[in-house]
Image (spheres, coloured by chain):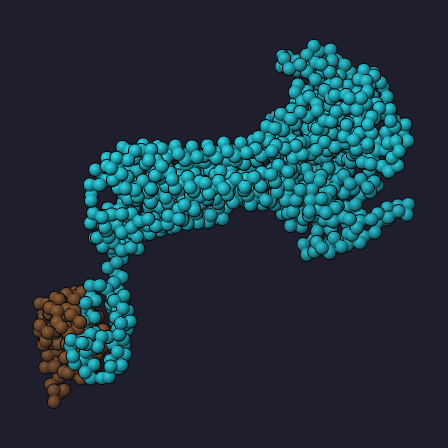
Amino acid sequence: MDHNNPISPPKLALKLIEWFCPDRLQEAIIGDLCEQYEINLDRHSKTWSKILFTYNVIRFFRYGILSRKAKRQHSNSTAMFKNYFKTSIRNLVKQKFYLLLNVLGLSIGISAFLICYLHLGYELSYDKQSEHSDNIYRLVTGDVNSGNGWVKVSAPMAPKLMEVIPEIERFARFESVTYNPYITVAYEDVIFSENKFYMADPAFLDMFSLPLVRGQRNTVLSDLNSVIISESMAEKYFGYQDPMGKKIRIDDKMDFIVTGVFSDIPINTHYDFDFLISFENLERVLPNTSLTANWGQFNYFTYLQLSEQSEAEQVVKKIQSTELNIGSNRTFDLANINIQALADVHFVENQGNIKPAYDFNYIYIYSAIAIGILFISFINFVNLTIANSSKRLKEVGIRQVVGALKAQLIIQFIIESLIVALFSVLVALAFCQFVFIPSINDLLNSQISFDFADPLLSVVITGLLLIISLSAGGYVAYFIITSKPVNILKGSAQSGKKGGLFKNILLGLQLTISTTLILSSLFIYQQLNFMNGKDLGFEKEGVLNVFLNNETMQQKGDVIAARLEQISGVTAVSGSDFVPGSPNWNNQVWWEGQEEAVTMPLITVHPKFIQTMGLELVEGNLDQIEESKKTQIVLNQKALEYIGWNSGLGKAFSPFGKSSGLRVDGVVKDYNFKSLHFEIEPCVLVLRSEKNYNQLSIKVQSSNLRATVDEMEAGFKEIIPDMPFEFTFVDDSLAQLYASEQRTSKIVATLTIVAILLASLGLYALLSFTLKEKTRELAIRKVLGVKSKQILWLLTRNYITVFAVASVIAVPLTYSMMNNWLDNFGYRIDLSPTTFIITISGILILISSIALIKTIHSGKINPTDALRHD
Amino acid sequence: MKGNYLGEFEELVMLTCALLKDEAYGINIVEQINEKTGRKVNLSAVHVTLYRLEDKGMVCSVMGGATAQRGGRRKRIFQLTNLGINLLKEAKANRESFWTLIPELKT
C-alpha cells in the first residue's frame, strides 16, 4: 500500500463520527478506525473496506460513547446558567438608563396589547349573562342585519305567535314606561327624575337570569302594583332602610310597592334599567295603548326564548307564514317580521336600540394599532439592546475564547431578554391596573378588568413573554455573534453592519404610523372645534332647558314660565318639546297645490320659542306671532326652497290633514336642529300656546348665571314645592351629540402621544446604534477637523431620507382616511395643506433635535479613546 | 467495594493490555484478542470497555506519538494501574483456589 497516497476512508462516515463522538475521545477512536480501515484495505476490496468502515463507525453510536458527551455538557451548563443569570442582572443594573428606556417602551407596547385584548373580550361578553342567551331572539322588522331594521314590534304579537308556534317556549316584552325622556319617582318627600324606568313581562327575569338580591324571581312581578329596583336605587331612595314593601309614586299619580331588589345591570348588556314593573301595566301607564289590539303599534322590545333543539330559520319561516286574524275579519301580515339572535344585538346598529351598537371595525382598528405599538416597542427594545451591546462584545469574546458554544451565548441573551420582558410585563400590569383600565373604562363607558382566573389571559401573557424574549434575545445574540466578538480581543472589532435596509424599513414604518396618527388627531381636533364654533342658526349659549317630568309639572308649565320670566336675569321663556339632536317627529304635510303628502320633521313649540332660541325671522311679524293663540306654522328656508316658493307668508300649508285651513305665519332662517352630521333639512315649526310641554327653554343673561339659576329654582319651588328642579344647558346637550367623536379624538390623541414617545425612543436607540457603529469614523473625522454641523448632517441624513419616504406614504393615507371620516358630517372642514406642512416640519425638527442631542453628546467623546485600540 | 469485580470481557481486555505493554491501543487489542482466542470483537466494544475500566480506575491512558498511519492521529495507549493489576491477580487467585478443589476437571 502506498502510504503517501492513501485511499481515504468515506468522508460521510468520518463527519458522522466527528459529530457524535465526544471531542476528548475523538482522536484516538478515529485513529483506530482509520488503522483498521487500512488493515482492511490489505485484506478486502476497496468497496468492502469502506462499507466496513461505515459499519464500525455506526457501531460506535452507542450509549457507552454518547453518554460521555452528554454527561460532560450537562454538568457544565447548570453552573453556566447560574452565571448567565448573575451577569445578566449585573449588566442590567449597571445600565439603569437603558433598562428604564427598555422597560418603559416594552411595557407600553405590552399594555396596549393587553388593553386591546381585554377590550375585545369585553365587547364579546355582551349579553352573555343569561344561561339561556343562546336561545333568546328578539322580534324585529326590516333588514336588521344590514342595519336598516326597527327592533320593536307590537304588544299582542308575541302571545299570538306563542299559541301557534310550538318552538317558542316563552316570550317577554320590554319598554320604557314613558314617552318623555324622564319620569319622576317619589318616595315620601324624596323625589328624583329617572330615565331608566321600564316595564317587562315577568318571564324577562328568568330569561335574562336577572340576579335578585331580595325577592323570588317567579313572584316579584306577579302583582300589577309590584316594582323591583336596583341596589343603587334602593340606596338612593331608602338609604339604610329596608326597601321591601315601601311605596313609591311615579309620575305623581301611580303607586307601586317594592317587592324585590336586583344587582345593578352590568354595562355589557344591550338593555339597562333601574326600575321594573309588570308589562301588564302598559295600558295604565301609556295612553292610547293596548295589550291585545293596536297591531300596528311597533313600540315594544319583544324577546322569544326558543326550545333547545329548534332551528331559528324554521321559526322565521313559521312566523312569516302565520296568518293572524285580528278581529272584524281583518288579517295582519307578518311577512316582514324577522328574528335577531341575542348575540348579534350588540354588533348591528339598528333603529330603536337602547344603546348604540358596537361597530366591529373598531376592533380591527384598535387591534392593528395595538399590535403596531407592540411591534414598534419590541423593535426599539431590540435596537436599544444591540446599540448597547458593544459594551458586551468583550465579555462575549472572552466567553467564546474560554469555550462557550454559540447555543450557550444565545441562551444567555435570551435569559437577559426574558428578565427585561418579565419586568416589563409586571410594569405593564401595574400600568393597566392603575392607569389604563380606569381611564379606558371612563372613556368607553365599559367595565373591563383583569380576570387572572381567565386561563386565556395567562396564555396571552406567557406567550408575549416567550415571543419577546426568544426573538429579541435570539436576534441580539445572532447580531453579536455574527459581529465576531473574538476579534475585539485581537484589537480589530467592528460591529456588523447587517440589516441596514431592514432597520430602515422598520424606522420608516414607525414614522409612517406616528405621522398618520399625529395628522389624524389634528384634523379630528380641527373638526370638533369647527362644529363647536359653527353658527347653528340659533343661540346655544345661555339657553337652558328645565324638565317637566310628570303631568303635574306639565300642567303647571304656563304658570312656571310666567313666574320665571319675572326674574331679572331671564330674557325669555318658552315651552318646547325640542331637544337638540333627538329624533324628530316626522309627519305628512300638504301645501297649496300639493296633492300627494310629503314627510317632513315637525317640532312643536310655544310661540315664544323663536325669541328664546334666537331664531331669525325672515318673513312674518314676531309680535303678531307671539300674541296669537291659534296653532301657527313657521317654515324654515330649506322648506321654502324645497316647495319652490319665493315667499311663504299666507300660503296654505298643513301638517294635520289635507284641508285643515292652516296658513304659513312665518319663515325662519335655517338652523341646525339635528347634529352637524346632517345637513339642514326642510323643517316645520308648529307653534301652539296651549300645550303641556315637557320642558321649558329659558334664555338667560350670561352674567351672574349662578344667582339667576338659584332664583329660578326658588321661583319654581314656589309653584310646585315638592318637585325636582332639573335643567341642562343646551350647549352641553349639543356637545353630547358629538360624544362618540370626542371619544375617538381622545383615544387617537392618546395613541398619538404613545406613538410619538415610542418613535422618539426608537429614533434615539437607532441614533445611539449608528453612533456606536461610526465611533471610529467620527473620531477620525474629528481628528481631521470636521465641524459638528457636518456630523449632525452625517447622522441625520439617513433618517431624513427615511422620513421623507414615510411622509410620502403617510400624507395620502391620512388624506383618504380623514376624508372618509369627514364625509360622516354634513358640515366639515377641508383638509388644509398648512396642517400637513406644519406637522411634517414639526416632526423634522423633532428628529433633528434628537440627533442634535446625540451629536452634542458625541462631540464630548475624546477621539483618542475611540482610536486607542487600533 | 461494590463493582470491583471484573467481567469476563473486561478481564480479557486487561490481560491483552498487559501483554501489549506500550502498544496497547484500540485496534491492536482487537487484533491481539483475535489472534490469541479467535474471537472477533468489534472495535467499539473494546473502546467502551476501556473507558469504563478507566472510570473505575483499573486502567489509565496516555496519548502516544503521531504516526504516518491513521492520518497522523495519535494513539491512546492504555496501561494497567496498580489497582487493575491487583484485581487481575486477585481474580486469578480466586479461580486457582477453585481449581485446586476440583482436581477431576484438570484432565
In x, y percent, where is residue B22?
Answer: 8, 72
Image position, residue A626 (x, y; %) = 81, 17
Residue A490 in the image: above or below residue A683: below
Q: Say which quadrant the N terminus of chain A sits in.
A: bottom left
Instruction: Look at 72% across and 31% down and name the residue there.
Output: A680
Residue shown at 20% from the left, 81% from the top: A41
In the shown orientation, is residue A730 left or right of residue A756?
Answer: right
Residue at far bottom of view: B107
Residue A435, placed above or below residue B16: above
Please indicate whether residue A545 sits to the left or right of residue A436 in the image. Answer: right
Closest to the observer, A695 or B88: A695
Front residue of A418/A661: it is A661
Q: Can residue A332 be seen in the rendering of this structure?
A: yes
Which chain did the image draw in cyan? Answer: A
The structure residue drawn at horizontal position 79% and vertical position 45%, both measured from the top left corner, is: A157
Q: Is residue A73 left or right of residue A548?
A: left
Residue A209 found in image quarter: top right
Instruction: Say above or below: A421 vs A839.
Output: below
Q: Toward which corner of the image does residue A614 lie, by quadrant?
A: top right
| Image quarter in which the C terminus of chain A is found | top left
Where is residue A343 drawn, in percent x and y?
64, 47
- The answer to whether residue A719 is above or below residue A840 is above
Residue shown at the point (86%, 29%) measured from the top left = A653
**Residue A725 position within the rendered picture, expressed as x and y whole percent measured from the top left:** 69, 20
Q: Which chain is brown?
A: B
Q: Could you tell me how many numbered marks the image carries?
A: 0
Residue A434 in sight in this render: no
